[in-house]
Amino acid sequence: FDTLKHHLSTQNFFQADEETRRLLIVLAGEAAQKRRYVFFSEVQFISEADLKAIDELWKQYSNNKYGYSVQKRLWQKANKDFTKFFIKVGWMKKLDTEIEQYNYRAFPNEFTWELNDETPEGHLPLTNALRGTQLLNSILSHPAFEGEEDEKEAEVKGSLRDNGPKPLTSLFPKPDYSF
């Protein structure tokens, strides 16, 4: 992780992002290395310690503005809606149209590679979602970040502890079949 630490400590966030991508490929195993990208199903083979180390370096050198755990918190606040999450972290830009529309930013020129007040929280590291969100979902759902508990889940667990278990019927509304 020395190369990643060097890029982050010198605020070279573009190279740090590239190094993070390279590390994920190496950590995912031989098959990922041969094809030069990670399948979502391979994320489970990356150790918790390694993912936490990557995350800690990003947080340390960005004043807790970047990192996977930061992204997980924002993703949960967006109710795990990737479109809302992408807008929040600045991976999508608003189009100049009459109705509200967004489009993915073009890599690498339309992303922010410096740390400043205008840079959205969670903007880095990037995880390509053009082929789908399964890889990012696997990273954010990895056991390394289980401590980043969903606020709604924590509320439900808290209310269950406070009031005892509730019957399942109270959790699901009765269907209305009247037409």
Image (cartoon, rainbow, N blue to C red):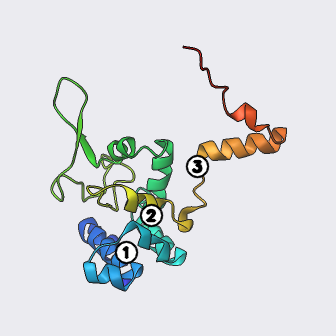
Q: Amino acid at mark 3?
A: Asp
Q: Position of residue 59 (x, y in %)?
A: 44, 63
Q: Which mark is residue 74?
A: none
The residue that mark 1 highlights is: 24
Q: If the image is split into quadrants, where does the N terminus sit?
A: bottom left
Q: Residues within 10 Å of mark 1 (few under 14, many from 20)?
A: many
Considering only order in the chain, which callout, 2 or 1, is on the residue closer to the N terminus? 1
Q: Residue at x 60, y 45 (%)?
A: 151
Q: Position of residue 160 (x, y in %)?
A: 77, 42
The residue that mark 3 highlights is: 150
Residue 171, quarter of the rendered image = top right
Q: Is residue 3 visible?
A: no
- The answer to whether the residues at label 1 and label 2 have Cβ atoms under 8 Å apart is yes
Q: Is residue 41 visible?
A: yes
Q: Amino acid at mark 1?
A: Leu
Report the side of 151 relative to 74 (left or right).
right
Residue 170, quarter of the rendered image = top right
Q: Position of residue 149 (x, y in %)?
A: 60, 53
Count of number-bearing discs:
3
Q: Amino acid at mark 2?
A: Ile
Considering only order in the chain, which callout, 3 or 1, is on the residue closer to the N terminus? 1
Q: Position of residue 74 (x, y in %)?
A: 46, 48
Q: Residue at x 26, y 55 (%)?
A: 130
The residue that mark 2 highlights is: 139
Q: Residues within 10 Å of mark 3 (few under 14, many from 20)?
A: some
Q: Residues within 10 Å of mark 2 (few under 14, many from 20)?
A: many
Against 153, residue 140 (above or below) is below
Report the side of 144 relative to 157 (left or right).
left
Q: CA distance from mark 1 to mark 3?
A: 25 Å
Report the side of 3 relative to 169 (left or right).
left
- The answer to whether the residues at label 3 and label 2 have Cβ atoms under 8 Å apart is no
Q: Helix, strand or loop at disc 1?
A: helix
